[in-house]
């Protein structure tokens, strides 16, 4: 009597661990980018995560307060050479001219030529991360962000089955998954119905 060879079990745990590992490696940079941006944007009430305010004084040649407003604006723009898109101008009093640009305001004391510049400048790294997080680029970035979301789903699901036995999903892992699931559910109930 000949024995039939035992069927080899599919090494699905090994494949699962390899897929989990490799997707994790591919996702490290995006995970850090989204996490840092999320931390920054979560506290938007306390600070501006995109821009930092800067104030500086400049000196230009004095200008005649009695000159026509159009001439004063043209002279100020030639002397200051401001960056950005011009929005408007305002003269709160005879000696002051204000120029408004998309990221800066220039307040010029005409008789002295002293200029107070109030500007906003993008935060070097956070501005870029926040723009990506909020999908400002659109187009191809939408596809990349969607693929990243799918990768996170794959990481979460494959991670459930990395370990087996008492430390796996049927043991202590179930308690951790339950606790992790309870946090957003309970908070949602509290926020929606009790707060």
Image (tube, helix red, strand yellow):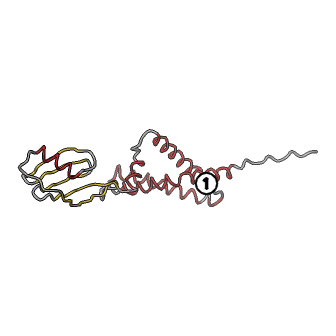
* Quadrant in the picture for residue 122: bottom left
Q: Position of residue 125 (x, y in %)?
A: 40, 56
Q: Position of residue 11 (x, y in %)?
A: 71, 50
Q: If the image is split into quadrants, where does the C terminus sit?
A: bottom left
Q: If the image is split into quadrants, where does the N terminus sit?
A: top right
Task: Point out the residue furthest to the right here.
Answer: 1
Q: Position of residue 45 (x, y in %)?
A: 30, 56
Pick the front one: 134 or 95? 95
Pointer 1 residue: 21
Task: Point out the residue furthest to the top here.
Answer: 139
Relative height, residue 71 to residue 110 (above, below): above
Pick the front one: 146 or 185? 146
Q: Is residue 172 left or right of residue 10?
A: left
- Count of labels in the image: 1
Residue visible at 82% across and 47% down in the picture: 6
Residue visible at 27% across and 49% down in the picture: 83
Residue visible at 61% across and 54% down in the picture: 21
Residue visible at 19% across and 58% down in the picture: 116
């Amino acid at each position: 009597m000949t024995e039939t060879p035992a069927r080899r079990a599919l090494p699905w745990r090994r494949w699962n661990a390899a897929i989990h590992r490799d997707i994790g490696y591919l996702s490290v940079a995006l995970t850090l980018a989204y996490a840092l941006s999320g931390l920054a944007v979560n506290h938007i009430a306390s600070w501006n995560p995109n821009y930092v305010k800067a104030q500086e004084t400049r000196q230009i040649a004095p200008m005649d307060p009695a000159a026509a407003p159009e001439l004063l604006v043209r002279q100020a723009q030639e002397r200051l050479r401001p960056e950005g898109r011009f929005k408007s101008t305002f003269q709160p009093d005879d000696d002051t001219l204000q120029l408004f640009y998309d990221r800066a305001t220039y307040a010029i004391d005409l008789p002295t030529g002293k200029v107070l510049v109030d500007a906003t400048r993008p935060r070097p790294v956070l501005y870029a991360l926040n723009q990506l997080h909020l999908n400002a680029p659109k187009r191809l970035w939408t596809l990349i962000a969607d693929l990243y979301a799918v990768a996170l789903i794959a990481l979460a699901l494959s991670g459930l089955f990395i370990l087996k036995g008492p430390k796996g999903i049927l043991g202590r892992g179930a308690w951790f998954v339950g606790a992790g699931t309870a946090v957003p559910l309970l908070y949602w109930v509290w926020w929606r119905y009790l707060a």
